[in-house]
Image: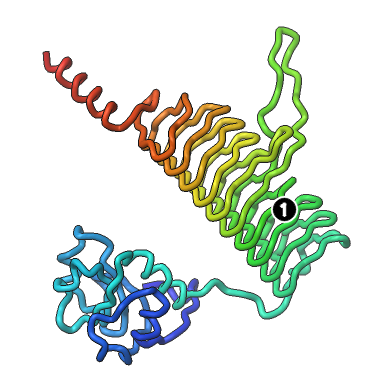
């Protein structure tokens, strides 16, 4: 159960309300007025809690749960105990996320709050209901939308623009950036610094000025200690709905479509373009100047050295279609046994 010292709870809600919030259907309409006070795991839940079944793997937990209600895929509804009310959802985890967010909404300041130890340029514009914490530095001509939260020791460079409901975590820095609404930059992230651009020669390395920006869409999360270089001439672009994990690296001029997912320790070299809904698993490396088609999925620790067609699933280094990788592994295993 969430610790009340850190997470402020709303509610209670009736099951009818929660069904509407989570896009669910009540298995038994007579359960509509049951009051639910909190979310919890199947194992720990009590009669005033709601939980969810993530997958078949946890069916035993569902059968034994004491939860007052559970969100369940219709295929598994019969496994719920008689005492547990059932909310039917074809996407239980998504429904749980919406319901959990209703119980634990993101805190918002009722008025603009600026800590006396924050440093804010006189030309900066801070939106209504924003909170600026101690040690934060906000540069000249910065524009922040409504209900933003700039956490301790974060730095917002000159002329940066961020929309409404944005969060910049502790010790993060945001430079040369234009960001949309609902952008969450986690602690320690570095956005908009110089790209890795120089000309190599026997005379030494000549630095190439990095004259682009970082453009971040709406509803984007950028994980802790992730780094996104600004463009050299073109912009680096993170599309709407993107989810970047911790410790991700975007080189200069990388551009993504909407709703891409890039998992921890993945790195994308400069000028590579991702389509919509691309997934790069952990520790994937992508060479520069490539095109990764929409819907492509790259398995963990793969090395991508060529363009990827839309909806392709690749694995290995160099990355090949997953079926080919499995055949290679099986063949190698047979050779070793000989």
Above or below, 24 relative to 180: below
Above or below, 299 relative to 30: above
| Residue plotted at (72% across, 53% down) | 155
The percent coordinates of residue 194 (x first, y second) are 71, 35
What's the coloring here?
rainbow
Task: Provide the residue designation for mark 1.
Answer: 155
The percent coordinates of residue 64 (x first, y second) are 15, 73
Count the labels in the image.
1
| Residue plotted at (47% across, 42% down) | 294
Q: Quadrant of the N terminus?
A: bottom left
Q: Is residue 262 visible?
A: yes
**Regarding mark 1 in the picture, which secondary structure is present there?**
strand
Q: Quadrant of the C terminus?
A: top left
Please rate how many residues cluster around mark 1, counting C-alpha atoms within 10 Å: few if below 14, some from 14 to 19, many from 20: many
Q: Quadrant of residue 128?
A: bottom right
Q: Residue furthest front?
A: 310
| Residue plotted at (65% across, 45% down) | 191
Above or below, 279 relative to 267: below
The percent coordinates of residue 124 (x first, y second) are 83, 61
- 246 left or right, relative to 145: left
Q: Quadrant of residue 231?
A: top right
């Amino acid at each position: 159960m969430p610790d009340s010292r850190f997470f402020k709870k709303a509610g209670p809600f009736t099951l009818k309300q929660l069904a509407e919030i989570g896009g669910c259907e009540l298995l038994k309409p007579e359960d509509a007025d049951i009051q639910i006070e909190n979310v919890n795991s199947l194992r720990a839940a009590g009669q005033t809690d709601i939980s969810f079944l993530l997958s078949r793997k946890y069916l035993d937990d569902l059968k034994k749960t004491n939860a007052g209600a559970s969100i369940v895929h219709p295929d598994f509804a019969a496994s719920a105990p008689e005492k547990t009310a059932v909310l039917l959802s074809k996407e239980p985890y998504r429904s749980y996320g919406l319901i959990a967010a209703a119980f634990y909404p993101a805190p918002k300041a009722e008025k603009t709050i600026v800590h006396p130890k924050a440093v804010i340029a006189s030309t900066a514009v801070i939106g209504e209901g924003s909170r600026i914490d101690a040690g934060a530095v906000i540069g000249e001509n910065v524009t922040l939308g409504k209900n933003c939260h700039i956490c301790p020791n974060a730095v917002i460079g000159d002329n940066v623009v961020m929309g409404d409901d944005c969060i910049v975590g502790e010790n993060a820095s945001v430079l040369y950036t234009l960001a949309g609404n609902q952008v969450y930059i986690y602690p320690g992230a570095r956005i908009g610094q110089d790209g890795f651009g120089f000309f190599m020669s026997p005379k030494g390395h000549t630095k190439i000025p990095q004259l682009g920006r970082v453009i971040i869409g709406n509803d984007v999360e950028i994980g802790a200690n992730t780094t996104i270089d600004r463009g050299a001439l073109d912009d680096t672009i993170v599309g709407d709905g993107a989810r970047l994990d911790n410790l991700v690296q975007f080189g200069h001029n990388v551009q993504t479509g909407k709703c891409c997912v890039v998992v921890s320790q993945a790195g994308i070299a400069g000028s590579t373009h991702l389509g919509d809904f691309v997934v790069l698993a952990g520790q994937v490396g992508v060479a520069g100047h490539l095109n990764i088609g929409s819907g492509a999925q790259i398995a963990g620790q793969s090395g991508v050295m060529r363009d990827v067609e839309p909806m392709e699933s690749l694995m290995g280094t160099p990355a090949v279609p997953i079926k080919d990788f499995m055949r290679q592994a099986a063949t190698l295993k047979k050779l070793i046994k000989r």
